[in-house]
Amino acid sequence: MSEILNKKALAEIVAVKLNATKKDATAAIDAVCTTLAEEMSKGNKIDISGFGKFEVKERSARQGINPATKETIQIPATKVPAFKAAKALKESVK
């Protein structure tokens, strides 16, 4: 079974790889995550070579069914974050 790697554990790994403090590694991870979110909120695509692409996709409005009442409801259009893994990343996890 695979483990879940949370931000704290990721920061520990990054700190060791960079010979940095956990505090500095956490700050770097936070900066990357914040930048990704800010750029995606502007509608920008982010392409990290060998890793993947982050982008915003639009879901059109559609009809759905409320499972509790079986009533038809209108689901509004929305934007959602999406990630597409690069070929190199796909190959590395095989």
Image (cartoon, rainbow, N blue to C red):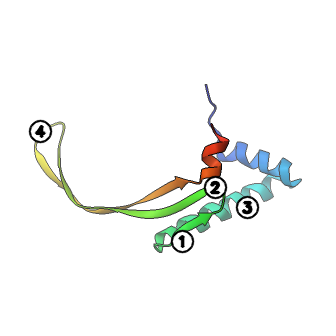
Lateral position of residue 86 relative to residue 21, left or right? left
Q: Are marks 3 and 4 in contact (CB under 8 Å)?
A: no
Give the amino acid type for the residue marked by disc 4 in the picture. Answer: Lys
Q: CA distance from mark 1 to mark 3?
A: 16 Å
Residue 40 position within the rendered picture, expressed as x and y whole percent measured from the top left: 50, 68
Q: Quadrant of residue 13?
A: top right
Query: In terms of secondary structure, where does tag 4 sit?
Result: loop
Q: Nearer the viewer, mark 2 or mark 1?
A: 2
Lateral position of residue 13 relative to residue 67, left or right? right
Task: Using the image, determine if residue 59 lies above or below residue 67.
Answer: below
Residue position marked by numbered label 2 in the rendering? 51
- Residue closest to the eye, 64 or 54: 54
The mark nearer the N terminus, 1 or 4, is 1
Q: Residue at x 46, y 72 (%)?
A: 43
Give the amino acid type for the residue marked by disc 3 in the picture. Answer: Ala
Q: Residue at x 54, y 65 (%)?
A: 37
Give the label on residue 70, or none.
4
Give the amino acid type for the residue marked by disc 1 in the picture. Answer: Glu
The mark nearer the N terminus, 2 or 1, is 1
